[in-house]
Image (spheres, rainbow, N blue to C red):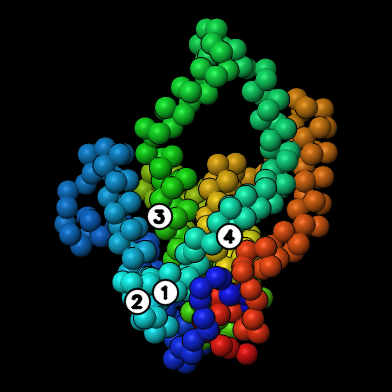
Amino acid sequence: MATPAGSHPASPPAIPGKAAVAACAAMAVSYVAVLYAPTLLLRLPPATSLRAFFHRRFVCAAVSSAASVLATAALLGVVWSLSDSSKALAVFGIRSDHLLEAVVVPLLLTSLVYAGSFVARLWAMSSSCGTDDDGVGVSCTEKLARWMQTSLQDVMVWRNYVVAPFTEELVFRACMIPLLLCGGFKMYNIIFLSPIFFSLAHLNHLFELHQQGCNFMRSLLIVGVQLGYTVIFGWYAAFLFIRTGNLVSPIVAHILCNMMGLPVFSSQRTRGLTSLAFLAGSVSFFCLLFPATSPKLYNARLDGCSCWHGYCRWS
């Protein structure tokens, strides 16, 4: 649909639809399976701390993501050039042009869904600002600085807001969507079906909850809610990636969603203000969904190709 500055359409080798689906399934399985490689395959002793445990997982996620990129490039026949790697990277939506638009517009669009959450949090902050957790007087600025310092040292913050958004979007959007598009699947089919791979990659949470002592039915309920949420977000992330052609757009949306969690639509403290904000934000989100993601905002020119980066020439 759109072509970033400096890229030109090319004719990649034909990819059978079944091969594209099989490759996506393999990437989803490997993304999860490699997390258990240190203990199951390499026979390393169990991590002695939570920090060490997640450091191992960060490395595994990076290795799996790199392998997915290389596999996708091989299947699409991407030619890498040290002198000009921008064309090859653009296949994966890794672009430097229109970067400001790709960050700000999707971030503001996604924020509309959390209008109720913002109202509830601001209300809570206004009532607690001026004191710390022990009731000792402290300025709001100092409290924010303490929170930021603590967050930077928290391995879970790095997991939820850095490693997971970057590696998951790279694998499940930047690698899988070009494969499925070149495999002959229509855009809207990909938007609604590709998140299945994304949600299946979260099934390992069921096993991990069981290991932590959570009973099966409770674990099933928790994972079921997670899967439903990941499917809905997967629809949105795939939509953003296809419409903008820039990987940074679903990444910033992913980070914000991980920070905010499920949208808050009601709060007793705010006397209906949260519900009103949630309703207004949700209506605005759906009204602006297509205008705010118009390919014209994120690309130097548009061509007749159905692909956003002008790489594949499917019908």
Query: Is residue 88 left or right of 287 when viewed as pictured?
Result: left
Q: Residues within 10 Å of mark 2 (few under 14, many from 20)?
A: few
Estimate the spatial distance between the alpha carbons at disc 4 and disc 1, rounded to whole Å: 17 Å
SS at badge 4: loop
Residue 242, given in percent of the width and then of the height, sits at 60, 70
Quick one: SS at disc 1? helix
Residue at 42% x, 83% y: name it. Answer: 76
Separation of residues labelled 3 and 4 (CA atoms): 42 Å
> Mark 1: few, some, or many residues within 10 Å (few <14, many ≥20)?
some
| Vertical side of 47 occupied by 206: above or below | below
Question: Which amino acid type is shown beneath numbered disc 2?
Answer: Trp
Observer-side mark, 3 or 4, equals 4
The residue where tag 1 is placed is: 88
Q: Nearer the viewer, mark 4 or mark 1?
A: 4
Looking at the image, which residue is at 83% across and 38% down? 276
Which residue bears the numbered disc 2? Answer: 80
Question: Image point 37% across, 39% down: which residue?
Answer: 155
Q: Amino acid at mark 1?
A: Ala
Secondary structure under the numbered disc 2 in the rendered image: loop
Residue that label 3 marks:
207
Residue 5's place in the image compared with 277, above or below, is below
Residue 172 at least partly seen: no
Q: Looking at the image, do the residues carrying marks 1 and 2 touch, with CB atoms under 8 Å apart?
A: yes
**Disc 3 and disc 1: Cα gap in Å?**
38 Å
* Residue type marked 4: His
Determine the image quadrant of residue 139: top right
Q: Mark 3 or mark 1, which is nearer to you?
A: 1
Q: Taking 307 as reference, is 60 above or below it?
A: above
